[in-house]
Image (tube, grey):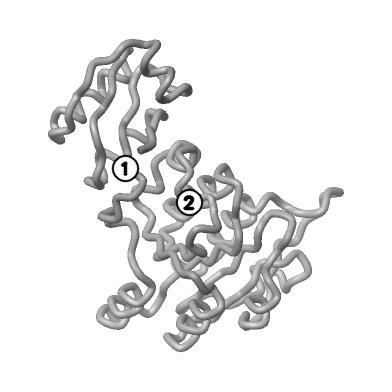
Amino acid sequence: MTYLTGFHAIEERIKSGLSCGSLLVAKAGPRAKEIITLAVNNKIRLERTGTYDLDGLAPDNRGIALQIFENDRTDSADISLENFLANLDDKNSKNALVLILDEITDPHNYGAILRCCDQFAVDLVISRNRRNAKHSAILSQTSAGAVSWVAQAETPNLVRAAEDLKEAGFWIYGADMEGEPVYKKDLNGKVAFVMGGEGSGISRLLRERCDGLTGIPSCGKIDSLNVSVAAGILLYEARRQIQK
């Protein structure tokens, strides 16, 4: 069991209708009272607890914390790649935007990426199961609750996932500072970006499955942008082109 402590994370989890346990309440300021009302309206059980006890369970709490059961797989935000592609075919979708995360291990980066995905209407985020930051408690807080809304699929084999996407008509572009500037790419249609891990970049086999590399022109003196910032820029450009 884990606990959500950020106000936005708790609020969005409850609004999403995803499974959760009790809302633990030690003290309630004005913002916490709004969330308590939301919880009551959504039939979430309230449990009064002492500040000392809540601090022991969720040290970063602000007077309230929401229980989350880590092994609960009923979250509607989690789907399989197979189901995603089947539904995409059913809708005859002309445009689709997917993000493949290759070994993103920092939960702050992962959460920030999910927040970008929510803002730019990414259809699916694909990551390798058991080897990323997805199930960290901090993820919900750093994503400001976006984790409850963004569709995510886990897979043991990202290379195979990329091949499945290509068979479904996706163009796959790996994010690389040496790649062709993103604004020169035609990002209409079905597009997937691959974001490499912090420091390690995109793995060799996955890079070989990419149809090309794309980058973000910059003038800075440090090596590159943070992966979450880079993801946000790439996704913005894709959404800008799609909505022209």
Instruction: Give the residue drawn at x 69%, y 75%.
Output: 213
Residue 157 in the image: state x and y as whole percent.
Answer: 52, 74
Residue 130 in the image: state x and y as whole percent.
Answer: 50, 58
Instruction: Please name the residue that numbered disc 2 is placed on.
Output: 134
Residues tagged 1 and 2 counted as in contact (Cβ below 8 A): no
Q: Name the secondary structure under disc 1.
A: loop
For discs 1 and 2, the disc positioned in front in the rendered view: 1
Q: What distance separates the C-alpha of mark 1 from that of mark 2?
A: 14 Å
Towards the viewer: 190 or 78: 78
User: Relative to residue 13, is residue 135 drawn left or right?
Assistant: right
Q: Name the secondary structure under disc 2.
A: loop
Does residue 28 appear anywhere in the picture?
Answer: no
- Kind of residue indicated by mark 1: Phe
Q: Residues within 10 Å of mark 2 (few under 14, many from 20)?
A: many
Quadrant location, the N terminus: top left
Residue 223 in the image: state x and y as whole percent.
Answer: 82, 53
Q: How many marks?
A: 2
User: Relative to residue 232, is residue 14 drawn left or right?
Assistant: left
Towards the viewer: 227 or 49: 49
Residue 206 in the image: state x and y as whole percent.
Answer: 63, 76
Q: Quadrant of residue 32?
A: top left
Instruction: Please name the residue that numbered disc 1 is placed on.
Output: 69
Q: Residues within 10 Å of mark 1 (few under 14, many from 20)?
A: few
Instruction: Give the residue drawn at x 41%, y 75%.
Output: 95
